[in-house]
Amino acid sequence: MAKVVIFGTELVAELAHYYLTNDSEHDVVAFTVNKQYIKSDRFCELPVVPFEEIETLYPKAEFKMFAPLSERKMNEVRATVYGEIKALGYEMISYVSSKATVLTDQIGDNCFILEDNTIQPFVKIGNDVVLWSGNHIGHHGEIKDHVYFTSHVVLSGRCIVGAYSFFGVNATIRDGCEIGEGTLVAMGANVTKQKTEPWSIWKGNPAKAAAISSKDIDL
Ligand SMILES: CC(C)(COP(=O)(O)OP(=O)(O)OC[C@H]1O[C@@H](n2cnc3c(N)ncnc32)[C@H](O)[C@@H]1OP(=O)(O)O)[C@@H](O)C(=O)NCCC(=O)NCCS
């Protein structure tokens, strides 16, 4: 059991507080954001403190952190915050729902894995990965750092997912695919190719690569 400070004061932070309080052994003690983003000194009836003062107020020897932020800017906002927290030396927890079926123990830190995900044997999940509710992650797959799955995505077996990738709702990926870093798979897309180029966007059924890069889209 850890005493945990959550980074964020938006809806996802409220959800993280809900999940940790109702379905984990951890005890949420406070929230933190950068000083300029503090709107109130309380959130979910707990203190909100400036991230700039976190080391003094909630030292790393006693507290752990959790930063399950959104997919904004192809996950780069969450990855930056993750990097800043790690640079201060904090241990970061992961949340894995008790209502998910998880048949691997290879899951990194700062992961947020919600109900009804099925994660098959021999899957490897990196750090700072979000699996919203109801995805299928097929056997012998690998998901690298800072990836975001929304809901009801089918990642077939033996796929390798590059860092910073994003999957919209109901996307389907064929088995053995190599998803290049920063790939954006649109909602409902059916990826039938064996490989996607880094920072590409795939839409439709069968999915076709868009002319623009995922770096050029305001996700
Ligand atoms: C791929 C995506 C990012 C495109 O965003 P966008 O560029 O802002 O798209 P727009 O809404 O401006 O639409 C541009 C065109 O692409 C089409 N399009 C958008 N999404 C599409 C999709 N998933 N599949 C097929 N075509 C799509 C639109 O119909 C539109 O076509 P038109 O120019 O012929 O009218 C977005 O549609 C998407 O899939 N987002 C993920 C949503 C999601 O899963 N949300 C869950 C969050 S929990």
Image (cartoon, rainbow, N blue to C red):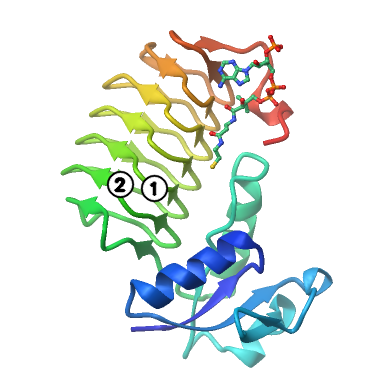
Q: Is mark 1 within 8 Å of ligand 1?
A: no
Say above or below: 71 vs 7.
Answer: above
Q: Quadrant of the N terminus?
A: bottom left
In the rendered structure, find residue 161 and report the number of the disc placed on it: none
Quarter holding the C terminus is: top right
Q: Residues within 10 Å of mark 2 (few under 14, many from 20)?
A: many
Among all residues in the image, which is located at the extreme right? 36
The answer to whether residue 154 is visible is yes
Image location of residue 178, percent across then percent down: 38, 24
Q: Is residue 101 left or right of residue 131?
A: left
The image shows residue 33 at horizontal and vertical percentages of 70, 71
Q: Are marks 1 and 2 in contact (CB under 8 Å)?
A: yes
Q: Nearer the viewer, residue 125 or 187?
A: 187
Q: Residue at x 24, y 45 (%)?
A: 119
For the residue marked with disc 2, what is the amino acid? Answer: Asn
Residue at the spot 62% in from the left edge and 39% down from the top edge: 74
Label 2's element?
loop
Image height of 112 relative to 34, above or below: above
Beta carbon of the mark 2 residue lies under 8 A of ligand 1: no
Left or right: residue 48 versus residue 85 is right
**Location of residue 160 in the rendering, given as x and y in whole percent from the top left corner:** 34, 31
Of the residues shown, which amino acid type is indicated by label 1? Answer: Ser
Residue at x 47% of width, y 54% of height = 128
N-terminal of the pair, mark 1 or mark 2, is 2
User: Label 2, on which residue?
Assistant: 117
Between the residue at mark 1 and the residue at mark 2, the CA separation in whole angstroms equals 6 Å
x then y, percent, for residue 45: 61, 85
From where the camera sits, is residue 92 visible? no
Residue density around tag 1, few if under 14, some if 14–19, many if 20 or more, within 10 Å:
many
For this view, does 144 lie left or right of residue 31? left
Which residue does the numbered mark 1 point to in the structure image?
Answer: 133
Ligand 1 quarter of the rendering: top right
